[in-house]
Image: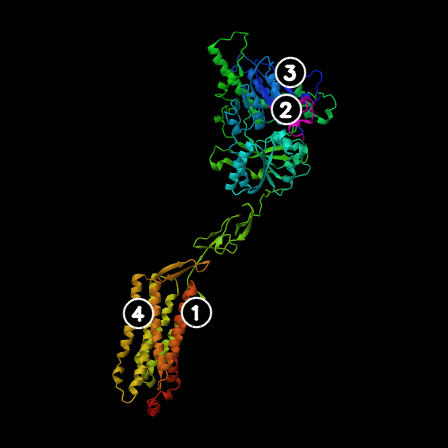
Amino acid sequence: MLTQLSSMHKTEKSLCFPKTSPSLSRDGDLVIGNFLPLYSIEVSSVRGAEMFQSHPDKGCRDYKWLHKNYQQVLALIFAVEEINRDPNLLPNISSLGFHLYNAYHSDERTLESSLQWLSGQGQLVANYNCWEQKPMAVIGGATSALTIQMGTLFNLYNVPQITYGYFDSVLSDKAQFPSLYQLANRDSSLHRAVVQLMVHFEWTWVGLITTDDMRGEEFLWDIREDMIKNGICLAFTEKTPVSERRYGESQDMFLSRIIESSVRVIIIHIDTDSLMIFRYSQPLHVYTWKVWITTSHWDITMRPCLRDGYNFNGALSFSHMANEIPGFKSFLRTVNPAKYPEDILLKEFWSSAFKDVEKFENQEKTECSSNASLEALPLYIFDMTMSGLSYTIYNAVYSVAWALHEMLLVTLEKESIRDGESWAPQPWQLHSFLKNTQFNNSAGHQVFLDDTGNSEAQYDIMNFLFFPNETEALVKVGQFISNVPPGQRFTIHKEAIIWSWMDSEVPLAVCSASCGPGFRKTAQEGEPICCFDCSPCPEGEVSKEKNMKLCKKCPEDEYPNKESNYCLPKDITFLDIKEPLGMTLACMALSFSLLTAMILWVFVKFQDTPIVKANNRALSYTLLISLIFCFLCSLLFLGRPTTATCLLRQTTFGIVFTIAVSCILAKTIMVILAFKVRIPGSRNKIWLHPGLSNCVILPCTGIQVILCGIWLGISPPFPDTNTYSQPNQIIIECNEGSVLGFYCLLGYIGFLALGSFTVAFLARNLPDTFNEAKFITFSMLVFCSVWVSFLPTYQSTKGKAMVVVEIFSILASSAGLLGCIFIPKCYMILLRSDENTKIHIRNTSATIMGRIQEH
C-alpha cells in the first residue's frame, strides 16, 4: 500500500510543503530509505546563514518538477515489487518496503529530509525515532555533495548508505565514510574517451565546465594531462558550485563569458543537479552556436526550458552503457494514477507532465485521461529507456535485498523464527553482509557493492538532435570500451552525426588555422602551444601532413617538390655523350685532335724544311702526339663512370700532360743551348746532342708515373653517387679517392709548366731566325692562366659542372699549346714558303750574328 506522509504541522500547513518535503512510503517488514531529487529549486540570492533564519515551511520558493528523475522512483517501485514476488529472495518471512524523500542540492533541504527520515513520520526531532519498522539502509546521493551531506548524519547512527550517483574516489575513504557504499562503475577512463573524441575530430582549442569539488578537480587534472599528450589546449575552465549555499556565496554569472568566447567546442563535466543550479538562474536567452560535449554525469535532455534544446542541437554525449532490465519498459507502459490511486506524488507528476504546469498552480489538479501513457511524453520530460542512475537504483535495491537475504539465512541457521514472529535486525548488522554482496541481476550483469569490485564504465556516444518541430532524439553514433585492445576502444560514425544549425560539416575548434603540408608550426610567444603561426619548410625539407612541428629531410634518393609537401625520386644523371653538352665537348675534342694530327702530318711532310729542323723535329713530333692524346683523354670524362674510366681519367690526363709540358721544357732548354752554341768561341756544342731532350722528358714523366702509382695504390678513384650537389638529381661521378693524390698530380704539372714558362720568358728576346721561346712563353702563359682559373672554379662547382670545367680546361690548355707553338710554324711552312729556305735562313742568321758582334 502506497501512502502520502502528512506534515506534523497540522494547524499551519504551508501550501508549498508537499513540494519542499514530499515523501512516499510503502509498508513492509523491512524498510529501505530512498532520497531522490524530484524537484529543483530556483536558486536564491540569499547568502550564508540568512538561509536558515526562516522556518523551512515558510520558504515557499519556485519548485520545479525534475520530470525525468521520476523514472528513478519507478525503478525503485519496480525493483521492490519484483523482489516481493520472487519466492527465492526473502521467502515467506519478510516483505520489502521503502520510504522515499526528495533530495535537493540545497543544504537546508537535504539536512531537513535526512532528519525527517531519521526521526520518522515527518518529525524534525533529532535522536527521536517513531518508526514502527526500523529502516535498514539508505539509497541516496545522486551527487557527491548530496551524498556527503546525508552521510554526515547517517554515519552517526551507523546506517548503511548506498550511493547510486557516479563513482567518486573521495567517497572510497572508509575512515571518513565507514557506512558508505558505492555501486556505480568507475569513470577513470572518461577523460580518455573525451580526449579520443577531440583527437578524432582534430579539435585542439576547447573549453571545460566542471564542478567545483574534488571530483571535478580530479577530472580536470586527468583530462589536462591527456590533452597535453595529444596537443590539445584548454581555452578556459569554469567551475560550477555543487550546492545552493555555495552558489549563493559566489553568484558568479560566468555563463555570459562562455557565450561570448570564441571557443566553439565546450566540454561539460557536471552532474545534472549541479548544472540545474545555474541553468535556472542563468538561462540561455540567445543561441550560442556552440558544440557541447557532455559527459555521463549530465542528462543532456533534462533542462528547465524546452526551447533550450535549440542550443544543444548536435551535442555529443557520453552515456553509460546500461543493460536493459527485462520487463521494465512493459512496467512503465502500465504505470498511471489509476494503478496507484493512493500515490499523490504520481498524481502530481502526471498532472505536471501531461499539462502546462502554470495552469495548475492556482487551481485544483485533476487526473488526466486514463488512456495516457508515459510513452507519449517527449524525451525532455520522460525517457522510456532506463537511465544509468535508474539502473544503479535498481541494482542498489537488489543489493540490500540480497544482503538481507544472506543475513536471514545466517539467522535461521543460528535460531528459528516462528510463524507470525517478526524478524527485526538492526541496521548496523547489515554492514558485514553488504561488504561481500555480489550477484547477477536480471540483465545478466554482475553487480558488486564493494569499491574494489567496481569495473570500468563503458560509454555510448549519443548525438542529441532537436528538430524544428521541437521534438528531440538521442542517436547512438559511437562507443568507447576501455577493456579492449587500444585500436578497438574508440569507434565513431562521423557520417551519422548531425551537427548544430550552422554546421553541415565537422566544426573547427582551433586557436590557429591549420598549417597545411609544406609548412611547419611556429610557436607564438607567450601563447599556448595550440596558438601558432605557419612557416614554410626550410629548403630541402618537407612536411607531408598538417600541423607538423618540424619539417623532415627527404631520403638521399629523393628531393622536395616545389610546394615542399612531397618527396620526388631524383633523376640519375651524369655527363652523357648523348646529351648536347657532352656531344659538343666530344666534337671539340675530336676536332682538336684531328687538327693536331693534320699539323703533325704537315710537319712530317715538310720535315726537311729549315723551320722544322731548326726547332728540334723529334721534340715537335713528341709534343704533337702528346697533344693528340691530351685532346682524346677528355673523352674519358664523358659517359657513365665505371671503375676503369675512373682509374684512367686523371692518371691518363696527368701523364700525357706531363709529357707535353716536359717536351715544352726540353724545347726551351734546347733554344737556349742553340743560341749559346752559335756565339763565336762557344764550347757548348756538346750539349746539343739529340739525347739531351730525352734526359728531360723521361725523368719528368717518370716522376709523374710514380706519383700516380702511389695514388692508385693507396686510395684510387672509384665510381660514386652524389646526392647533394643538385637537389633533384643523383649524379654518378668519380670520387677522386685521395684528394691529396689528385692535387699532387695537378701540382706537379703546374710546377713543370711554371718552370717552362720561366725559362721561356728569360729566353724570349734571344736573337734568332725562328725564336721559338716567344711562342713557348705565350703558350705557357695561356696554359698557366687556364689551370690557375681551373682550381677555384673546380672547387666552387658540384656534380656535372666539375667534369665540364675539367674537360674545358684540358681542351683550352691543350688548344693554347697547339695554337701558340705550332700555328705560326704552319703559317710559315704553308703560306710563307719563300722564307723557309736555307739561303734566306743563312742571310738572316748572318745579319743577326753581325749585330751581336757589334754589341
Circles 4 and 2 in contact, beta carbons < 8 Å: no
Q: CA distance from mark 4 to mark 2?
A: 110 Å
Q: Nearer the viewer, mark 4 or mark 2?
A: 2
Q: How is the image coloured?
A: rainbow
User: Camera-side residue: 220 or 633?
Assistant: 220
Which corner quadrant of the image does residue 315 belong to? top right
As helix, strand or loop, the secondary structure at mark 3 comes to: strand
Give the mark nearer the N terminus: 3 vs 2.
Answer: 3
Q: CA distance from mark 2 to mark 1?
A: 102 Å
- Which residue is identified by label 4? 704
Give residue 343's position: percent from left, percent from top.
Answer: 65, 18
- Which residue is identified by label 1? 584
Q: CA distance from mark 1 to mark 4?
A: 30 Å
220 to the left or right of 637: right
Count residues near mark 1 (Cα–Cα under 10 Å), then give few for <14, some for 14-19, many for 20+.
Answer: few
**Residue kind at label 4, given as amino acid type:** Gln
As helix, strand or loop, the secondary structure at mark 1 comes to: helix
- Which residue is identified by label 3? 3
Circles 3 and 2 in contact, beta carbons < 8 Å: no
Q: CA distance from mark 3 to mark 2?
A: 22 Å
Give residue 374's position: percent from left, percent from top.
Answer: 64, 24
Q: CA distance from mark 3 to mark 1?
A: 113 Å
- Residue at 39% x, 76% y is 781
User: Camera-side residue: 586 or 650?
Assistant: 650
Count residues near mark 4 (Cα–Cα under 10 Å), then give few for <14, some for 14-19, many for 20+.
Answer: many
- Which residue is identified by label 2? 109
Give residue 216's position: percent from left, percent from top.
Answer: 56, 33
- Residue at 29% x, 62% y is 713
